[in-house]
Amino acid sequence: MGTRDVILDAAAHVMHSRGLAYATTKEIARAAGYSEATLYKHFKDKSELLVAVLRERSSGFVPLMKALHDRAGEATVLETLAEVALAAIAWYEHGFPMLASVFSDPKILASHREGLRRQGAGPHKANEAVAAYLGAEQRLSRVRAEADVDAAAGLLLGACFQYAFLSHMSGADVPDRRSADEAGLAFARALVESLLPETKVPKSVRRRSTPPTG
């Protein structure tokens, strides 16, 4: 394993256990068994190191987002959105302990934002990737032409984010808590009827009609 990989592994451990605000480059270097000077040969600052950890030491969410546009027309929209949701839940659950402490200090938050901007990264990239995928499905007529793909992306990822948030805040105390697999599929299903052309909505997810009363 190369020096960069050792540093990334150490950074992932320290950031996850202590939170980003309290994970210093000195502590990360010590955990990796190197000097800070060695760390800075591979990473410009802590923000760049965090982005590398999220991209390379988390779930497969980031690679999935990068490849998502090219997945249009392959699996069903429901299957792809369910895969996205499950990966997003895992990614958010993994990232919360690292990222939560960023908001404890305005200076740390500003520095983190600048680091993301400099690298062309940020949480909005996931929304853009999902919206771009749905836009590609629109052009294939597998998603309704009038569907708001940006809103759909926000709804899907927002539901995944909340699921991860509740996991950390409430743990097992949430009544009737769904598993991540169940939740991811449910979130995807909830969007499908509004996204797919009427003739392509699976019967299992169509809204049940309510008979008129009176």
Image (tube, grey):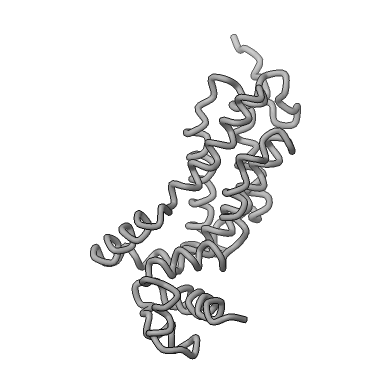
Q: Where is residue 4 shown, x and y percent of the image? A: 52, 77
Looking at the rendered image, the quarter that the C terminus falls into is top right
Residue 4 as seen in the image, left or right of residue 69: left
The residue most toward the front is 41
Q: Point out the residue furthest to the top here.
A: 214
Q: Is residue 135 visible?
A: yes
Q: Nearer the viewer, residue 36 or 31?
A: 36
Q: Is residue 37 left or right of residue 133?
A: left
Q: Is residue 28 above or below residue 111?
A: below
Asked if one can make out residue 207 in the rendered structure from this viewpoint, the answer is no
Identify the residue at image location x=54%, y=49%: 160
Q: Position of residue 5 (x, y in %)?
A: 56, 77
| Side (left or right) of 25 relative to 12 | left
In x, y percent, where is residue 195?
A: 60, 27
User: Residue 65, relative to residue 44: is it above or below?
Assistant: above
User: How many numbered marks have been drawn onto this rendered protein structure?
Assistant: 0
Image point (32%, 62%), residue name: 103
Q: Residue at x 49, y 66 (%)?
A: 52
- Vertically, is 203 above or below 58? above
Foreground of the two, 33 or 107 = 33
Q: Which image quarter is the N terminus in?
A: bottom right
Q: Residue at x 28, y 66 (%)?
A: 108
Name the spot of residue 17 as percent of width and height, x first.
47, 77
